Every structure is written in structure tokens, then in C-alpha cells.
Image: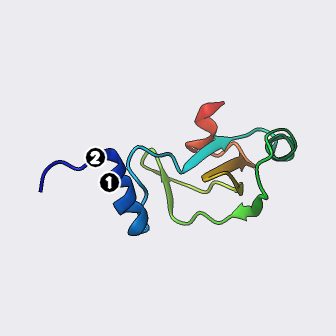
């Protein structure tokens, strides 16, 4: 059998519709202004189009062991083969998203 090269592993993963090793497929950013972030990603970086999910329903949330009810908008788009996720939290509800502030 032998050891497979990185190119062989990537080729097999592609044939099996799997993500090849050592690749990045998604980057997520928590933003303070979704419209501003969308304009930047589209107009400056040429990414998109973006699809917006307003007030995304995240059910049965638990954050640090306690129930949470985070209200977020999520914008999803691509830059080449990489998916870009922009996340905007509407409230000060404790969550992983506002730990970045």
C-alpha cells in the first residue's frame, strides 16, 4: 500500500466530495455593522454574492452552561472556494459572538 502523497489524498477527497486535508473552506467574522461589512467584502474584496439570514433562529442554545437566546443576522457568501460568514448579534445576550468585543 505505502504512504500516500498529499496530492493523492487531495485527489481522493475531491473524488469523494470530501474536503481535502490542509484546506480552509470557511471563515467566520463577528461584525459590529453588517451593512458596512457587506459593502467592504463585496465592493473592496470582490466577494459574493451574499445571502442574508435575518434573525437566524438558533434553538436550544446553551452558553457556558446556561440557556441563551441570541438574536443574530448571518450573511453567507464566497470568495473563490472559501465561504465567508458575517455574523451580527442584535443584543447584549451572553454568547460566543460578543466575547470578541
Q: Name the secondary structure under disc 1.
A: helix
Q: Residues within 10 Å of mark 1 (few under 14, many from 20)?
A: some
* Residue at 12% in and 57% down: 1
Q: Quadrant of the C terminus?
A: top right
Q: Nearer the viewer, residue 86 or 10?
A: 10
Q: Give the spatial CA distance, label 2 vs label 1.
A: 6 Å
* Residue at 80% in and 46% down: 46
In the image, farthest residue toward the top: 101
Relative side of 82 to 14, left or right: right
Residues at circles 2 and 1 in contact by the CB criterion of under 8 Å: yes
* Residue at 28% in and 46% down: 5
Q: Name the secondary structure under disc 2.
A: loop
Disc on res. 41:
none
Task: Residue 66 in the image: state x and y as whole percent.
Answer: 47, 50
* Residue at 83% in and 47% down: 42
Q: Quadrant of residue 69?
A: bottom right
Task: Residue 28 in the image: state x and y as whole percent.
Answer: 61, 45
Task: Residue 27 in the image: state x and y as whole percent.
Answer: 59, 45
In the image, farthest residue toward the left: 1
Q: How many marks?
A: 2
Amino acid at each position: 500500500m505505502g504512504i500516500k502523497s498529499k496530492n493523492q489524498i487531495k485527489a481522493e477527497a475531491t473524488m469523494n466530495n470530501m474536503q481535502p486535508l490542509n484546506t480552509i473552506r470557511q471563515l467566520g467574522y463577528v461584525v459590529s455593522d453588517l451593512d458596512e461589512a457587506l459593502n467592504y467584502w463585496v465592493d473592496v474584496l470582490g466577494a459574493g454574492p451574499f445571502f442574508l439570514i435575518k434573525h437566524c433562529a438558533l434553538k436550544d442554545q446553551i452558553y457556558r452552561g446556561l440557556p441563551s437566546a441570541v438574536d443574530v443576522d448571518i450573511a453567507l457568501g464566497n470568495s473563490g472556494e472559501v465561504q465567508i460568514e458575517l455574523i451580527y448579534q442584535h443584543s447584549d445576550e451572553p454568547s460566543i459572538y460578543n466575547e470578541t468585543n
